[in-house]
């Protein structure tokens, strides 16, 4: 059973709220405002290593939630933190580093901590229990500029922000699958451990993007979500997908895996009418984040990866319950060329 | 370091929102509405056993959050679910039982699941990783009837709903500290595993209760929170604290420990002016939940447990990081008689 199947089978129910399970954020109306709400749980051994720098964990736990708000075009407002810690980790040095980085990002993005829950993680056998961090972030969206994963239309341009694949490259380096130079290794590790949520860009794209998602599970998997929810297909020009010099230098199979299915990018993938191209470049410039047009949407369903021959058909996003790389359930790898 | 000290030192910052860290719910204004938001994390080995009935876990994970909304007098609206599951537990029988009970309570209380996150729990050594459930619930409060932990006044009556101590008695039975008859054991276990959030009573008390809290860490610890935040003291008539026949029948030391410091009661503790007594009885009758007046608030600070001699001065609420029973930091046990 994949994560998508698990959610679809056991947890997806019709809702009266504006937008429910399956998008980056839930949307609920409160008077004349609409609130975007998102939750992400980071678990030791899955999302971070046991010896993680607590500062990067504090930063990343909030950053991945702000990235969801960015996709929704929401302005961050406040968040709640639930933290399960084994008692040996509840020491001043760990907590100072964790909370310091958390509050630094929160302050920069204008997002206040308003509540939470702390609990001891029970030991598992002779080992300390795992650290678990669950943050719920709340933002505000203007009702006129609401967007989710389902608004993409055939003919729209397909865009991404920043560069993809460096976080996955850092993991490959840590696993010894590739050997990077010291500076490149540090740069890539920074992308993995200190992702920068594209909040300003997400806001600047209000009224321009027809759909958006943040790339957390890899370009192919997350794009598949948009295509499925919007009922369209896509042609992606693989050579145009932006990547760092470090990633360009590694061998082709690993390069394409990191680029297309790497995960942990926390860049924005968005769609927009070609008539908005100039406005979109202006919005990106205003927010200081580079963007690249990587393809276009088609009436014909399916995702076509063009410009590279022989791309591994198993390239997909990471799936927690398949324990491997998987696409969404209705995503058809046979459609790719 | 206690849980209260940990929160105060590392996570409590002044906020612009209406109410932040330290109450049952955060309160945020959205147009003419005020939203109450709360999050609770339930961790295996701390809040439930590894062989927990998944149906009771699904119920309880939502119930403890709805109990926080009840304390705030909020009408439940929607919730987000983050679930970390070891792959062996992600089987249809477990998930059907968990989600079935979750949605049954959600449906009964009019609270929709609108979003979430599912992740695999990594193995710890040779053992499965622990199940972790984190729910964030959102409710609506009328601004005119907002209440928290800080509104109690000297002279107010002190009330509790239902009966206290049976959940703790079930734990004592499971640990072999006491031997209950089969029917009593089942009744107490039901209180531990299937707590019923007092949402209807919480709503009925709008405009009547001056402060309220749900009793999750034991009467003495949670009352201490209200007293400290409100700057008042209390006289509690211990013989009047309501308890079941099962709890009445066990020996005095264990009985008082379960009753006053047991935790997991999920009853409401609230304060109100004596002028509201008739209206409060009517509200309770309307919501179908019994209530009992157990004491009154005093100008003199401190908590006095009256009517029983020689109560153990270490009776306090459960603290996760002290790993033992602890009161809030400024709570002075020497004031008790």
Image: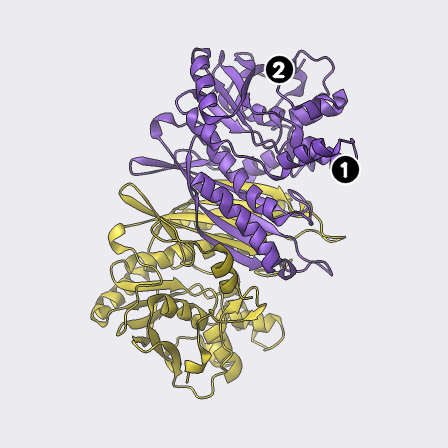
Chain colours: A yellow, B purple
Label 1 and label 2: CA atoms lie apart by: 28 Å
Q: Residue furthest bottom?
A: A309
Which residue is rendered at x = 70% and y = 51% of the image? A128
Which quarter of the rendered picture does the N terminus of chain B lie within?
top right
Q: Find disc 2 in the rendering and name its residue.
A: B240
Quarter of the image with the C terminus of chain B is top right
| Picture residue at 37% right of the left edge, 65% below the top | A229
Mark 1 = which residue? B175
Instruction: Tell me, yes or no, if residue A161 can be seen here.
Output: no
SS class, disc 2:
helix
Looking at the image, which residue is at 72% across and 18% down? Answer: B311
Residue A37: x %, y % from top left: 40, 49
Q: Quick check: B29 above or below B151?
A: below
- Closer to the camera, B206 or B228? B206
* Image location (x, y in percent) of residue B12: 50, 37
- From this view, report whether residue B167 is shown above or below residue B315: below
First in sequence, mark 1 or 2: give its number. 1
* Chain under disc 2: B
Query: Is the Cβ of the residue at disc 1 closer than 8 Å to that at disc 2?
Result: no
Residue A152 drawn above or below residue B128? below
Residue B63 seen: yes
Q: For this view, does B337 lie left or right of residue A206?
A: right
Q: Regarding mark 1 in the picture, which secondary structure is present there?
A: loop
How many C-alpha atoms fall within 10 Å of the one at disc 2: few (<14), some, or many (≥20)? Answer: few
> Of A231 and A290, which appears nearest the observer?
A231
């Amino acid at each position: 059973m994949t994560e998508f199947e698990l959610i679809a089978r056991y947890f997806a129910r019709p809702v009266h709220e504006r937008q429910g399970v399956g998008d980056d954020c839930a949307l609920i109306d409160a008077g004349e405002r609409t609130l975007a709400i998102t939750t992400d749980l980071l678990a030791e051994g899955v999302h971070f290593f046991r010896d993680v720098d607590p500062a990067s964990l504090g930063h990343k736990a909030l950053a991945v939630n702000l990235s969801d708000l960015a996709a929704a075009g929401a302005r961050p407002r406040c968040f709640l933190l639930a933290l399960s810690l084994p008692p040996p980790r509840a020491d001043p040095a760990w907590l100072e580093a964790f909370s310091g980085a958390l509050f630094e990002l929160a302050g920069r993005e204008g997002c206040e901590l308003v509540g939470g829950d702390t609990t001891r993680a029970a030991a598992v056998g002779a080992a300390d229990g795992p650290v678990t961090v669950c943050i719920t972030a709340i933002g505000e969206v203007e009702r006129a500029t609401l967007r989710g994963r389902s608004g993409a239309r055939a003919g729209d341009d397909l865009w991404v922000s920043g560069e993809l694949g460096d976080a996955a490259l850092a993991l490959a380096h840590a696993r010894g699958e590739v050997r990077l130079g010291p500076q490149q290794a540090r740069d890539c590790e920074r992308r993995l451990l200190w992702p920068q949520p594209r909040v300003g860009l997400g806001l600047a794209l209000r009224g321009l993007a027809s759909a958006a998602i943040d790339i957390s599970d890899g370009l192919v998997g997350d794009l598949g979500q948009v295509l499925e929810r919007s009922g369209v297909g896509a042609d992606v020009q693989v050579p145009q997908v932006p990547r760092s010099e470090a990633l360009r230098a590694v061998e082709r199979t690993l390069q394409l895996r990191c680029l297309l299915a790497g995960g942990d990018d926390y860049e924005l993938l968005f769609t927009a009418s070609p008539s908005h191209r100039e406005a979109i470049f202006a919005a990106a410039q205003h927010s200081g984040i580079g963007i690249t047009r990587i393809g276009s949407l088609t009436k014909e369903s399916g995702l076509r990866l063009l410009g590279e021959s022989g791309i591994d058909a198993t390239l997909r996003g990471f799936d927690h319950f398949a324990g491997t790389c998987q696409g969404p359930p209705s995503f058809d790898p046979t459609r790719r060329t």
